[in-house]
Image (cartoon, grey):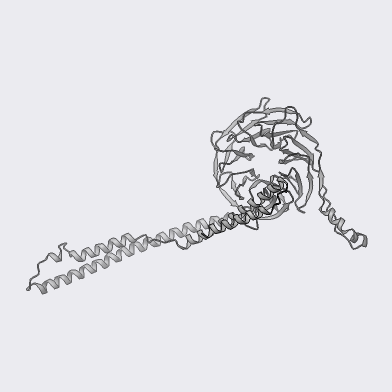
């Protein structure tokens, strides 16, 4: 009844809020307001669900009954003792013995002796049972203690220390992908607000904002050696642009009268973000994609790129001429991700058709291999060390494959939520972002390493769309994550061997 009343009151308040919107308000503004109210209601329901789950767990733990394992043995022993007293030591029933006046004293003596014998037998049997059960209890308790101590010691030996050490905010819509620049303390983000941003890790500021796309920016990748960035967009194009950032942070005001008078201008300069609208190279036109470019990546030679689109194709492009070199066809549904090998001319493409494909460009005629094993959309597939590929899917599984064996996965990790764009560190740790706001760490053998903390004060509040490892710790940040709460977090993760 209480929950029903609460729901009615919420609906009433929601309708009141809706009635506040003026009738002449723009249609888009009304939609934004309504969606904001819906998100607010879902957030409150989620927090109530968590509270109820905690109460249920506490109630279950407090009312758990512990059953004695030897109840049946004791009941059997008691029944045997009662039967022994009733029948006597010879097995003949005392009630069946005829009683005569002359034999009454003798019968009483015999009965007393039989009762004494039965009592002594009962006591000895009880002592044997208690000694036997007591010994087994001790052995079982010792065994359980030993096993528990081993489990606890193994947990202690594998403790992972993780915490948020940096936070970046400024996008006006959800963030699709985050990338870390090797050798420089900067990261890049691609957002649905039609922009891509370069952030300084130390300052937490946006150093450069790219505004050259006309649609959602769906992916971002840094050039390995130059200050170049590759982005793919919902406008059907991919861009390469110059990521030259201004490292000079505007100085704070001094004590001179002129600078004091101009303090407002200094604050504006400090908050000002450099913007860029013109790309160095645009990949579009004849032979290009006919729909949304969902992902793009540099090949190991850095003179070619690969793009994937909702038009069910991937395209290999030449960077210098911005011309398509080869279309990659074969997927039955839209592509969701593309990734290139860091040192070899290999590419993997993931699709909604539940498969991902390996393309080998080391030969004149590229070879293709199809990996089947997921039951729903493959959301990402990336290369890992030792010639392995890791794939994640909406079927809530992550699979580790060997390049030479596409028939079956080496390891399968089962989770409780859909998987988004995952990342694998050089040490072989898989970071898995989920729709349910969690981030989990596993190794390439499928063993769980850790789950990053998520509370009301720490972690993402919407789905985690992407993660990226730093090749080397950048300002104590080992891992970066982004989501549709418009936030980017830098995580410090200390693995057992490092702790």
For the residue pair 6 and 56, the one nearer the viewer reads as 6
Name of the residue lying farthest toward the top: 365
Q: Quadrant of the C terminus?
A: bottom right
Q: Residue at x 9, y 69 (%)?
A: 99
Task: Give the residue displayed 68% in from the left and 28% down from the top.
Answer: 327
Q: Position of residue 23 (x, y in %)?
A: 70, 49
Residue 4 vertical position relative to residue 396 in the rendered view, above or below = below
Q: Position of residue 437 (x, y in %)?
A: 62, 50
Q: Nearer the viewer, residue 205 or 449?
A: 205
Position of 469 compared to 94: left or right? right
| x, y percent for residue 430 | 61, 45
Residue lying furthest front in this view?
23
Which quadrant of the structure image shows residue 328? top right
Q: Is residue 419 visible?
A: yes
- Image height check: is 461 above or below 115? above
Which is more toward the observer, 275 or 143? 275
Position in image of residue 196 (x %, y %): 75, 44
Left or right: residue 119 compared with residue 464? left
User: Which quadrant would residue 121 be assigned to in this image?
Assistant: bottom left
User: In this image, 83 relative to 494: left or right?
Assistant: left
Q: How many marks?
A: 0
Asked whether residue 496 is in view, the answer is no
Q: Is residue 497 above or below residue 114?
A: above
Q: Quadrant of residue 368?
A: top right
């Amino acid at each position: 009844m209480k929950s029903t009343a609460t729901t009615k009151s919420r609906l009433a308040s929601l309708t009141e809020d809706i009635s506040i919107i003026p009738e002449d308000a723009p249609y888009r503004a009304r939609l934004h307001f309504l969606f904001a109210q819906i998100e607010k209601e879902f957030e409150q329901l989620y927090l109530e669900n968590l509270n109820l789950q905690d109460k249920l767990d506490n109630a279950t733990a407090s009312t758990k009954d512990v059953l004695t394992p030897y109840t049946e043995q004791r009941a059997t022993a008691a029944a045997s003792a009662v039967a022994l007293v009733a029948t006597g030591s010879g097995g003949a029933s005392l009630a069946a013995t005829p009683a005569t006046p002359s034999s009454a004293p003798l019968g009483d003596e015999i009965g007393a002796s039989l009762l004494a014998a039965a009592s002594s037998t009962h006591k000895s049997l009880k002592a044997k049972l208690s000694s036997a059960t007591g010994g087994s209890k001790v052995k079982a308790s010792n065994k359980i203690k030993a096993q528990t101590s081993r489990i606890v010691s193994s947990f202690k030996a594998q403790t992972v220390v993780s915490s948020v050490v940096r936070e970046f905010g400024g996008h006006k819509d959800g963030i699709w992908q985050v990338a870390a620049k090797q050798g420089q303390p900067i990261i890049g983000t691609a957002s649905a607000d039609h922009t891509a941003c370069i952030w300084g890790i130390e300052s937490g500021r946006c150093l450069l904002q790219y505004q050259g796309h006309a649609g959602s920016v769906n992916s971002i990748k840094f050039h390995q050696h130059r200050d170049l960035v590759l982005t793919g967009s919902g406008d059907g194009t991919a861009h390469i642009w110059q990521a030259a950032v201004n490292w000079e942070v505007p100085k704070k005001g001094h004590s001179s009268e002129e600078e004091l008078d101009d303090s407002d201008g200094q604050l504006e300069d400090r908050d000002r973000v450099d913007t860029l609208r013109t790309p160095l190279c645009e990949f579009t036109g004849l032979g290009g994609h006919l729909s949304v470019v969902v992902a793009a990546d540099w090949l190991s030679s850095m003179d070619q790129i690969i793009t994937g689109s909702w038009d069910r194709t991937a395209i290999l492009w030449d960077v210098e001429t911005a011309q398509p070199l080869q279309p990659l066809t074969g997927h039955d549904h839209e592509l969701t991700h593309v990734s290139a090998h860091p040192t070899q001319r290999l590419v993997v493409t993931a699709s909604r058709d539940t498969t991902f494909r390996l393309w080998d460009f080391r030969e004149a005629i590229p070879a293709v291999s199809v990996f089947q094993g997921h039951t729903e959309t493959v959301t990402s597939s990336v290369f890992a060390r030792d010639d392995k590929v890791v794939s994640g899917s909406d079927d809530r599984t992550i699979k580790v494959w060997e390049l030479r064996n596409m028939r079956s996965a080496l390891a399968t990790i089962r989770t409780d939520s859909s998987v988004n764009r995952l990342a694998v560190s050089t040490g072989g740790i898989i970071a898995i972002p989920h729709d349910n706001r969690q981030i989990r760490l596993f190794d390439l053998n499928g063993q769980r390493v850790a789950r990053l903390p998520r509370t009301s004060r720490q972690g993402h509040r919407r789905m985690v769309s992407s993660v990226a490892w730093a090749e080397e710790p950048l300002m104590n940040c080992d891992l970066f994550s982004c989501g549709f709460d418009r936030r980017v977090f830098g995580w410090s993760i200390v693995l057992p061997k490092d702790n």
